[in-house]
Image (cartoon, helix red, strand yellow):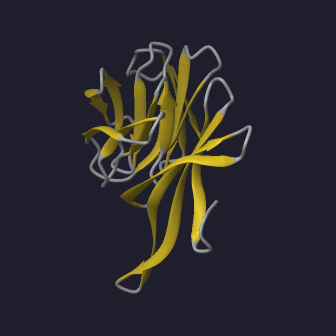
Amino acid sequence: LGKSNESITNIQIADDGKSIFASLSQLGQIQGTPSVATTRMIAVDVASSKIRWSAPTTYVGMAPMVLLDENLLLGGGPNYFDRYSVTDGKLLERKGAHKGPVHALGMNKAGQLISAGADGALVTWRDGEPASRELPHSGSRTALTFNKDRTHWLTAGNDLVIRSWPLNAMRTATIQKI
């Protein structure tokens, strides 16, 4: 599956359970400092355990990944935010919005992608474009999750604050300082 110097850093499973998608990263050195680079993505057929396709990438760090319909979304931060075909691994689209690494991705009930980044921003994406960019915390956003019904979502970051948000609202419903 991977080379001896690679690690699986992201994984997604298709809704039908027949395919697994993963990004593989290598630990390296940049000017004497340890660094991580996401070097390729793979699609694995679950039934046969065989790689269906492998596509090279050049992302800095461990790029977040999310599966949406027939698209695999990967990247963000200092990297482009890319959309790949799950069928053949071909790059379909490339965009950007954050000013640093993306630490978390989520999907709200309306099917909008939300990304949380080291730049402190929460970006809501509509139709593949950044629709809003908010700075609700002081410092880096390190976590983002939705409840089961996707009617509320939580964000957290280096400010040690957990915020609860109602769907489609950029105002805090609840704040918990840890």
For the point 33% across and 26% down, the residue is: 125
Is residue 177 among the parts visible in the rendering?
yes
168 sits left or right of 135 in the view: right
- Rendering quarter of residue 47: top right
Q: 75 or 164, which lies in front?
A: 75
Q: Nearer the viewer, residue 161 or 28?
A: 28
Residue at the image position 41 percent from the left and 30 percent from the top: 114
How many numbered circles does the render carry?
0
Residue 74, x across and y down, in percent? 42, 43
* Vertical position of residue 135 compared to residue 107: above or below: below
Q: Residue furthest right?
A: 47
Residue that protrudes farthest toward the bottom in the picture: 32
Residue 7: image location, x then y, percent: 60, 63
Residue 140 image position (x, y, % from top left): 41, 50
Question: Which image quarter holds the N terminus?
Answer: bottom right
Q: Where residue 48 sits: x, y (%)? A: 72, 43
Left or right? Give the position of 95 relative to 146.
Answer: left
In the rendered view, would you say 11 is above or below 176? below
Classify residue 147 as left or right of residue 87. right
Q: Residue at x 30, y 55 (%)?
A: 78
